[in-house]
Image: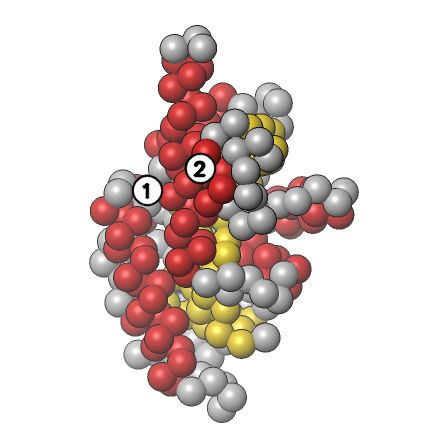
Amino acid sequence: MSQDLPASIPAALFYERADAIADAARELAQQGWTPATSSNFSMRVDNDHAAITISGRDKGKLGRDDIMLVDMHGKAVGTGSRPSAETELHTQVYRRWPEVNVVLHTHSRTQSVASRLFAADGIIRLQGWELQKAIRGHTTHESVLDIPVFPNTQHMPELVAQVDAWIESGKPLHAYLINGHGIYTWGHDMAEARRHLEALEFLLGCELDLKRLNA
Ligand SMILES: [Zn+2]
């Protein structure tokens, strides 16, 4: 592979992360959540580095050569490959929360439609759903789970600033949507990040059904 690793990162560790990303990506692609090479996935490797999908690859067919190393400011490390355009949104999460080890970003149809429908509100408020308990720290369906919807832009620093502003306002953040685009969520490990993503996909689908039924 064309990835040179810093001496502090054993190849076995990088491969383990790359394989875990590829396995998750394949399963999420099978669900149709990563159309047309979209979406990106990453895992923390150590305090200063993350492994992330290389831009433009089919997420259903990732191998070790499709994953690269970046620093926590989204710069490529030891490779000429180009990381996903949205890498800074991943490293932002890792810098903010040292306990987070996985960030997942997908573009499912449900996520995309929900983001458009709730963009004017800037938020989707989930309340009364049993499956909210799948989200870390939520122990009852009576809890309130706010998912912000940020305007889309191709200028990443703007998106990073919007996410920072939300966090700095003191509101909890487990995931966010980008209008007309998709969702970001994360977790302490792959299982938790997958659980968050799956629960949110389901809950957004339920909210869309209620709108459709005018309920
Ligand atoms: Zn995207």
**At 75% across and 45% down in the image, what residue appears?**
170
- x and y percentages locating residue 153 in the rendered image: 56, 39
Q: Is residue 202 left or right of residue 142?
A: left
The residue positioned 58% from the left and 65% from the top of the image is 99
The answer to whether residue 55 is seen in the rendering is yes
Task: Decide which of 113, 170 is in the foreground and name it.
Answer: 170
* Coordinates of residue 115 in the picture (x, y in percent): 49, 29
Q: Residue at x 52, y 33 (%)?
A: 141
For marks 1 and 2, the one nearer the N-term is 1
Q: CA distance from mark 1 to mark 2?
A: 20 Å
Question: Which element is circle 2 on?
Answer: helix
Q: Give whichever of 107, 127 is nearer the camera.
A: 127
Q: Can you name the residue that lies furthest to the bottom here?
A: 7
Question: Which of the 4 quarters of the picture holds residue 202?
Answer: top left
Q: Secondary structure at mark 1?
A: loop
Tell me the amino acid under the disc marked 2. Answer: Leu
Amino acid tagged 1? Trp
Q: Which residue is mark 2?
A: 131
Residue 33 is tagged as 1
Residue 115 visible in this rendered orientation of the protein:
no
Asked if the residue at tag 2 contacts the one at tag 1, i.e. Cβ–Cβ closer than 8 Å, the answer is: no
The front one of 46 and 178 is: 46
> What mark, if any, has residue 18 been given in the picture?
none
Q: Is residue 46 above or below residue 164?
A: below
Image vertical order of residue 126 relative to residue 136, above or below: above
